[in-house]
Image (cartoon, helix red, strand yellow):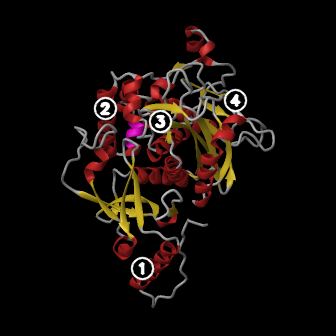
Amino acid sequence: MNLGIKYIYIIDSSISKQQMAKESTKSIGKTLKSAGVEFVRVLWCDNANIIRAKAFHVSTLADHWQTGVGISRAQQAIPVMYDGVAVNAGLGPVGEVWLVPDWETLGFLPFAPTHAQVMGTMMDQGQPWSLCPRHFLQRMVMAADQLGLQIQAAFENEFYLLKTNSGEILPNDRTVFAATAAMNQNYSVIDGIVAALFAQNIQVERYYPESGPGQQEISIRYASALTAADHQIAFREVVRGVAHQQGLVASFLPKIFTDQAGNGCHLHFSLWQDGENITPNPQQQGHLSPIARQFMAGILHHLPALMALTTPSVNSYRRLKAHCWSGAFRCWGYDNREAALRVPSNPQSPSPTHIELKTMDASANPYIALGGVIAAGLDGIRRQLEPGEPVAIDPGNFSDAERQDRGIDYLPDHLGAAIAQFSQNTVLQEAMGAELVQAYLAVRQVEWEAMKDMNLAEEVHLLLERY
């Protein structure tokens, strides 16, 4: 079923805007009615990366299809722990913005068949709100376009399938990496997830059980930057919804078990120009183009601050350890899974086709994280930065002196350090805008203060079903 809706009208000047609006409402209404939808959820992702929604009944479509639903401005100041406003966010009980549906993102939910969902953009007095994460990414897409660049991206998620036993959270299987036994045990829920993703026009490419017991990975095809972030929201909703329908808990929390693999959410991205992938160097097979090197250098330069956007949870830093393939070092390498930036090779096509940022997890708001990555990369292009030499071994095997000689840094090892780096980074702050920065930092800071002394069990109890 095709769930993306795009309306194209060829009209003459005698047709009024009111008539166009009426026809659009009727078309959407027919689509929803034929699918048996009762409620349409308008989704947003807040600064704590909680996916939230307000729903309207289809009988009121005419009242909501264009204006959406109202939400308090303070929603962008809510931390992950509770529904209360973070101090110093610049937001409070006064004021409302409107969550306006982007109908091209309409998707039906096999795990909640009488509901549909659509991504919303926050609007204030008819204009995109400066604190809207989705609009921030749209602005960064436009900034890239001004340099003649388009960004294609995909989020590669790892997640655990869990079950409860007398209140204890247990993995749904006890297998190892890529074990067919795990495929056999989990095929029903995996098939349900894949079917629901395809139903939303999200192309699934690969699946395999990951290293942790009960851990899974499903890779989806790349798309334009905004669509990729929308897909990440839909992906998380589908995985959790289908798992719940089958009596399981799915969690993307970066670190659940002390002695088992963490959950990453690697960001794969490529640079395009006029419909052509310009990431590879056409003159040197196996090498990056000069502009891709500059883009990557910008990310490496800003990465300690960028981590406040890409690994924004206190729990994130339990995963970011040496020798854990998590991207704990500021360096890059060809097919080096310990480097923060990995350049994959592909012998079947001009290579490399894309770059992978490993220092990221699904506690990140995908609009803010990808927007920040683009801002950092564009700064690298504007300043013609160079990323240095690729690292061909595990950087954790170097001595401190060897890493220093090679310009390899150990990245921030707790959220407080990443917040401090971000607070001093003018490039990322100017890209986001002062109001979004203020609210975002307020949320990060109150989360850090509330959770910095928690042990892992306390974090898991609080966050397992948030992410």
Alpha-carbon span between mark 4 and mark 3: 41 Å
Which badge, 2 or 1, comes first in the chain's sequence? 1
In the rendered view, tell whether residue 278 sits above or below residue 35: above
Q: From where the camera sits, is residue 344 visible?
A: no
Identify residue for label 2: 445
Q: Secondary structure at mark 1?
A: helix
In the rendered view, tell whether residue 396 sits above or below residue 294: above
| Left or right: 305, with 447 as reference point | right
Q: Name the amino acid, label 2.
A: Gln
Magenta segment: 426-430
Front label number (2 vs 3): 3
In the rendered view, tell whether residue 380 sits above or below residue 110: above
Q: Name the amino acid, label 4.
A: Tyr
Q: Going by the picture, which residue comes out furthest to the front?
A: 166
The reply to whether callout 1 and callout 3 are in contact (CB within 8 Å) is: no
Identify residue for label 1: 21
Which badge, 4 or 2, comes first in the chain's sequence? 4
Which badge, 2 or 3, comes first in the chain's sequence? 3
Identify residue for label 4: 334
366 drawn magenta: no
Q: Residues within 10 Å of mark 3 (few under 14, many from 20)?
A: few
Q: Going by the picture, which residue comes out furthest to the left?
A: 94
Q: Considering depth in this image, is 299 or 48 the residue closer to the camera?
A: 48
Q: Considering depth in this image, is 236 or 129 the residue closer to the camera?
A: 236
